[in-house]
Amino acid sequence: MRSVADTSVPKEANMIAKIEENVSMVRQGKATVLVGSQWGDEGKGRITDMLAENADVVARFSGGPNAGHTVIVGDEKYELHLIPSGILHPEKQNIIGNGTVVYPPAIVKELEGLKNRGIQTHNLFLSENAHVIMPYHLQLDRLEEERKGDDSIGTTKKGIGPTYTDKVARRGIRIGDMLDLAFFTEKVDENLAYANAYIQHNFPEEPLLTTNDIVEEYKPLIEVLRPHVADTSLMLDQARKEGKVILFEGAQGTLLDLDHGTYPFVTSSNPTAGAVCTGCGFGPAHIDEVIGIIKAYTTRVGHGPFPTELEDETGEQLRQKGHEFGVTTQRARRCGWFDIPIMKFAIRVNGLTQLALTKLDVLTGFETIKVCTHYEVNGERIEHLPTNGKLLKDAVPVYKDVPGWTEDLTDVRTFDDLPKAARDYVLMLEEIAEIPISIVSVGPKRVQAVLRTP
Ligand code: IMP
């Protein structure tokens, strides 16, 4: 079986080796958490892939196939939804924790896709306590969104909300439940009766699923997943005791958090750092570093407030230059300027110890770059991100103009080689953040990063 690095041309292989050597410059403890600091799509996958170099274990702790990570190695592009980015490193353990939700057809497709490209997958472990997304969850997600019309959340329609709803209602089906077919069939029967009664009452035109259809569809998938099912909390504990380096890979972003995000325009789980503990069965005292991934500007998919959104040509320029189209849904992302209150909010609720600033190269060519320093709400100055939806909707961003640069950054590999205006942009954000910006990414490839000593 070939390793992913073999796909690179020699020059690039050398550069990868250099980056891999330098990755040790990034302060990583034994357990490091990576979280999105905005509304998702900050480039977590490529940063995880880079830091996974030093890790023995990579674990997902929340969300499901609503996430989409693109990792580019050499000329190969990998789009991962649920499987951790560490899968591209054959010697690492990859864990999908109990806090996630798993759609068997999608994860099996992802596994097959990797196998077909020569990537080993024996190193994937799936928590027996993760919840299973069932076909009626997808149906319910779609129907609820359609019913809400203009007030819809703009979900990924992957069944995330309904699956977590069943989990909280204590009737959900867990991965471990699928392993005994008779028990699984019984649970599907029970749950489907519940879902169908609701669908029939509210959406009488909608065709109903049967237990048999679902069990027949899932039966072969269960066999593919069976060897991967494990007690992943126990595995993580063993890894910790053996002194292994563990990387927790967040999905979505801080502002999509069910509790801390722009409710109700959020996802149905907690993508913030605290969820590592509940979503993996890993104690908080064992976490050493929390790195927030933050884009050099802001994007959002789906509906809900977005104070610095640019609904003009500049927004379109950011979208085109940054290829801001969803990996999971292909939807065009809404784009806007960098928002300092959001950065400070992410630092606070996640307890960030470092930042990774991504896509700085996309800002090349803007004569002036705007940065939101605070908001005005009804004429009053507000420094922090209001979590009250109405206040945030009415918040008017107040900007500071900073000089842009014209140089292409995609080949820059050291901080000193960045144009002065780009360096100043990073240093300005770092001073406000009061935590180091230890990684600056300047392109989608593994090598396209500037690493800084904290
Ligand atoms: P859900 O997670 O599919 O229920 O969608 C809820 C909200 O979260 C919607 O606004 C989605 O667009 C957004 N969302 C979910 N996953 C991601 C992601 O990985 N990146 C960006 N937005 C996401």
Image (tube, rainbow, N blue to C red):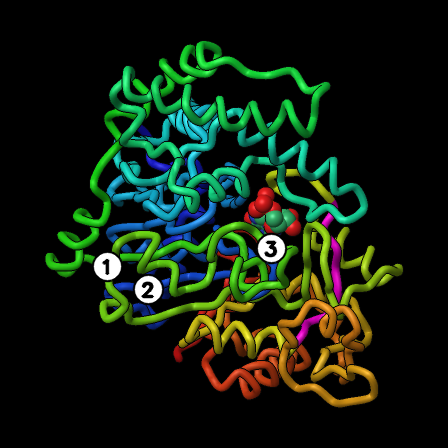
Q: Dot 3: what SS?
A: loop
Q: Amino acid at mark 3?
A: Val
Say whether marks 3 and 2 touch (CB < 8 Å).
Answer: no
Name which residue lies at 68% across and 72% down. Answer: 338
Residue 128 sits above or below residue 365 on the image: above
Q: 243 left or right of 286?
A: left
Residue underneath mark 3: 266
Q: Secondary structure at mark 2?
A: strand
**Range of residues picked out in magenta:** 332-339
Left or right, residue 78 beside residue 6 = right
Is residue 323 in view from this perspective?
no
- Residue 298 in view here: yes
CA–CA distance in space, label 3 to label 1: 31 Å
Q: Nearer the viewer, residue 330 or 176?
A: 176
Q: Which residue is mark 1?
A: 245
Residue 37 in percent (x, y) is at 54, 66
Q: Nearer the N terminus, badge 3 or badge 2?
A: 2
Compared with residue 273, is residue 181 higher up or lower down, i.e. above or below? above
Residue nearest the viewer, comparing 50 with 184: 184
By secondary structure, the bulk of the magenta-drawn segment is best described as strand
Q: Quadrant of residue 226?
A: top left
Q: Is residue 9 above or below residue 307?
A: above
- Are circles 1 and 2 on residues that touch, CB within 8 Å? yes
Q: Residue 347: image x %, image y %?
A: 49, 76
Q: Residues within 10 Å of mark 2 (few under 14, many from 20)?
A: many
